[in-house]
């Protein structure tokens, strides 16, 4: 028996298909977790037997896709408030040294709940802190994503270049190179699901050029290709990093990555603030993706990524909330607004339109994560749908263009969110967890972390 759900009478369905089709008064039919029809009126053949979800007062978008995050950082927000990246990291590494599976579980629930309530249906997580004896950290966040119902792309990160070897992180936070590689392979073998519509995919993700050895970078690339999974790392985030690459290796960041086998359509980088025009073209030509994290880059004073140029050249480009200790929020619709605003800093003609910002947050993110089954609403795509209300205070007066209102006006909390056609948020509340309880637990754990860090 096929399960059928009709989302009907939306204010607009913004499909994010190739033509940018928008259907005023549109409806979406979902059959067994897959979109089977988008249009206005009743679907061909009717939908009498379908369950109905009232789309009135809402803009329907594909679920948003977050391409860079560190869920464990959610419980260490509002610290090192006036530091740049390196000062911020040095202040936070000792706090993260206390990470264990319970912290990870609580942080992941808070961070994933925030993302879901912002309309995000698929998220990546870049987890690179594995203190000895911390327990099954990846397993803890995977369990949280399953509980809340989000599509999840956790990256098994790693660091093996401690302070005593000239790296930035303290020695007790880094792993031995072979241990990191073995644990990464184990994570892929245990969790990765390559099938269409997959809810869980693992990527290989050593942390950054200043916390990882050349050997770990090179062997991670070999490992990922042997296992058929994607590669992710931080790149070209700050001027300091660029200097480090030139001083230590005589190469700019992207040149260094190329030398180490890290350029290609199975790779995506977080940030890319210091990609120059040539780098941007290179990313486009090779299909190398960029996770644009505008709030984090502004909060840490890193700079402004070349979002306009990346889009113009056709490089896969998505958004990342990053953090959330360098943001310090996990709201992807806010990030779309931030991308639009910051792209206009040097003139509106260089900036993104509201629709481009929404496209980067959906289609763009899907491309960055290597997914061709999510990111747009058309027949055959997985049924990840975000219904944002445009009947509230924030969008009153924006009746001419409720789609643009999502980005230009104050971003609303999602009203309904479906992943694989299953409800993750209904009427603004989580379905797979109790928001108040998740928040209480987050504050309790946040106090524990603060107390331990002050000792
Ligand atoms: Zn990051």
Image (cartoon, grey):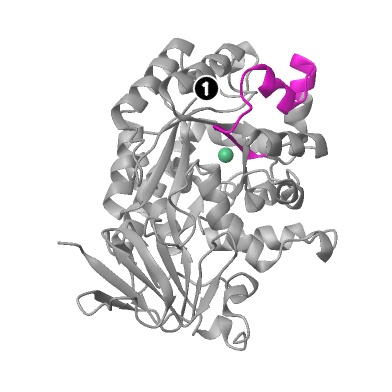
**Depth order, front residue of 46/268:** 46
Q: Which residues are magenta?
A: 244-271
Q: Is the C terminus in the top left, top right, bottom left or bottom right quadrant? A: top left
Residue 127 screen position, x and y as percent: 46, 34
Q: Quadrant of residue 153?
A: top left
Residue projecting furthest to the front: 45
According to the picture, the residue beneath numbered tag 1 turns out to be 159
Membership of 258 in magenta stretch: yes
Instruction: Say if residue 201 shows up in the picture.
Output: yes
Residue 242 screen position, x and y as percent: 76, 29
Quadrant of ligand 1: it is top right
Residue projecting furthest to the left: 1
Q: Is residue 114 above or below residue 409?
A: above
With 104 as the anchor, is 229 left or right in this view? right
Membership of 206 in magenta stretch: no
**Depth order, front residue of 14/455:** 14
């Amino acid at each position: 028996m096929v399960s059928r759900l009709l989302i009907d009478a939306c204010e607009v369905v913004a499909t994010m298909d190739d033509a940018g089709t928008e259907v005023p008064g549109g409806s979406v039919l979902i059959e067994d977790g897959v979109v089977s029809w988008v249009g206005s009126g009743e679907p061909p053949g009717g939908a009498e037997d379908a369950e109905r979800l009232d789309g009135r007062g809402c803009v329907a978008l594909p679920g948003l896709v977050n391409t860079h995050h560190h869920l464990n950082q959610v419980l260490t927000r509002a610290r090192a408030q006036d530091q740049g990246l390196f000062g911020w990291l040095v202040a936070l590494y000792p706090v993260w040294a206390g990470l264990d599976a319970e912290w990870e579980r609580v942080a992941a629930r808070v961070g994933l709940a925030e993302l879901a309530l912002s309309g995000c249906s698929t998220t990546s997580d870049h987890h690179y802190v594995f203190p000895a004896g911390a327990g099954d950290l990846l397993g803890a966040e995977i369990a949280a994503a399953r509980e809340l119902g989000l599509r999840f792309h956790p990256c098994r990160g790693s660091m093996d270049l401690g302070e005593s070897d000239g790296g930035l992180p303290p020695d007790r936070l880094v792993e031995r190179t072979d241990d990191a590689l073995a644990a990464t392979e184990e994570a892929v073998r245990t969790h990765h699901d390559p099938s269409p519509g997959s809810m869980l995919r693992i990527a290989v993700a050593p942390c950054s050029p200043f916390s990882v050895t050349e050997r770990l970078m090179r062997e991670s690339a070999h490992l990922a290709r042997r296992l058929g999974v994607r590669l992710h790392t931080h790149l070209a985030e700050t001027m300091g990093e660029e200097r480090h690459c030139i001083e230590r290796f005589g190469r700019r960041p992207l040149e260094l990555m190329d030398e180490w086998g890290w350029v290609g359509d199975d790779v995506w980088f977080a940030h890319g603030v210091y990609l120059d025009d040539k780098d941007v073209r290179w990313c486009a030509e090779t299909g190398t993706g960029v996770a644009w994290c505008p709030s984090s880059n502004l909060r840490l004073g890193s700079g402004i990524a070349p979002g306009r140029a990346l889009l113009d050249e056709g490089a896969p480009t998505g958004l990342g909330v990053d953090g959330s200790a360098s943001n310090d929020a996990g709201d992807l619709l806010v990030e779309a607004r931030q991308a639009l605003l910051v792209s206009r800093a040097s003139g509106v003609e260089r900036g993104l339109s509201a629709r481009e910002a929404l496209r980067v947050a959906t289609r763009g993110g899907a491309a960055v994560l290597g997914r061709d089954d999510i990111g747009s609403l058309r027949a055959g795509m997985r049924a990840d749908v975000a219904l944002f209300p445009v009947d509230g205070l924030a969008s009153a007066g924006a009746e001419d263009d409720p789609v643009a209102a999502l980005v230009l006006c104050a971003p609303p909390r999602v009203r309904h969110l479906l992943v694989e056609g299953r409800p993750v948020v209904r009427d603004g509340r989580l379905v797979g967890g109790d928001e108040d309880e998740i928040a209480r637990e987050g504050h309790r754990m946040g106090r524990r972390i603060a107390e331990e860090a002050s000792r």
